Image: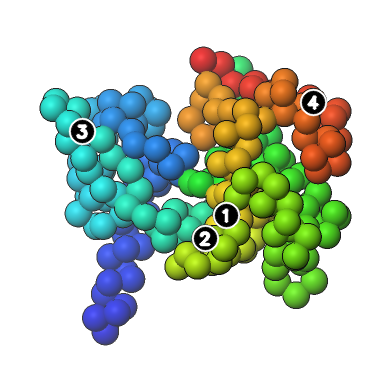
Amino acid sequence: MTVEADSVARLAGLLADRTRMTLLLAMLDGRAWTMGELARHAGVGASTASEALSRLVTGGLLIEDRQGRHRYLRLANRQVARMIEDLSEHATPDPTAAAPRGLRAVKVSAALAQGRTCYDHLAGRLGVAITDALTERGLIEQTDGVRLTSAGATWLSELAVDVDQLRAARRPLIRTCLDWTERRPHLAGGVGAAIRESFLTHSWVEPGRTPRVMIVTDLGRRELPGLLGLDSAELTGLADLAPA
């Protein structure tokens, strides 16, 4: 076995654990979590969470910051986030898996499907609807891959996004992800991240009460139909279903 094969096998083994993958998926919201928050989210004890997180830190997938008694953990970089996204894209639903049980589990699942953050961009039905609207208005093109049009660059500039800065960055300017719940593309890359940040700044979207969930605000439901031609009825459905 080659050194490269050894490295890939170690990485695959690190990811091939339900608890560790649950923790990584939670951190796709892009923020730093405490160990206690992650343990509660994964439904495991503190010692189990601590062992899983230590392995992920050692494996280079997480970064740990200590502030006093608190231990904060977050994804190491965008490359790790993209890898987790790509794995989610390729994962197919298990037909033998039980559906979410209990009202809370059902609501959390529905809320994540409606709108969520995928590290630094919007996903779920919200992310797909925005991508569709940008395409229909000629702000992006998806005929051969995906590209930002000149009209799209102007539109972003009107939202106070520095397009030249996005172009100069090392990350891809624009790309799409196959949304794992919608099975259709949502926007990622520098443009996807800039749209999420702009929508948050304008208070058109906001974090829900459940990790990763993003909801459209009352202001967003009033302004996004004019901004992008999004269907107001569809936006009204993107409410925070998940319990506190």
Q: What residue type is labelled 1?
A: Asp
Q: Which amino acid does label 2 sit on?
A: Gln
Residue in view at x 52 percent, y 54 percent = 85
Q: Is residue 124 left or right of residue 226?
A: left
Q: Distance between the residues labelled 2 and 4?
A: 30 Å
Per the image, label 1 sits on a secondary structure element best described as loop
Per the image, label 3 sits on a secondary structure element best described as strand
**Residue 113 lies in quadrant:** top right
Residue most extreme to the left: 68
Residue most extreme to the bottom: 2
Q: Earlier in the sequence, mark 3 or mark 4?
A: 3
Per the image, label 4 sits on a secondary structure element best described as helix
- Which of the numbered marks, if any, corresponds to residue 162? 1
Q: How far apart are marks 1 and 2 (CA)?
A: 5 Å
Please name which of the two marks, 3 or 4, marks the residue nearer to the observer: 4
Q: Which residue bears the numbered disc 4?
A: 222
Residue in view at x 70 percent, y 47 percent = 158
Proximity of marks 1 and 2: CB atoms separated by less than 8 Å: yes
**Residue 232 lies in quadrant:** top right
Q: Which of marks 2 and 4 is nearer the N terminus?
A: 2
Q: Badge 3: how crowded within 10 Å, few (<14), some, or many (20+)?
A: some
Q: Which amino acid does label 4 sit on?
A: Arg
Q: Where's residue 187, x and y in %?
A: 65, 54
Residue in view at x 61 percent, y 63 percent = 174
Q: Is residue 170 left or right of residue 125?
A: left
Q: Distance between the residues labelled 3 and 4?
A: 40 Å
Q: Which residue bears the numbered disc 3?
A: 71
Q: Where's residue 3, x and y in %?
A: 24, 81
Q: Earlier in the sequence, mark 3 or mark 2?
A: 3
Q: Which residue bears the numbered disc 2?
A: 165
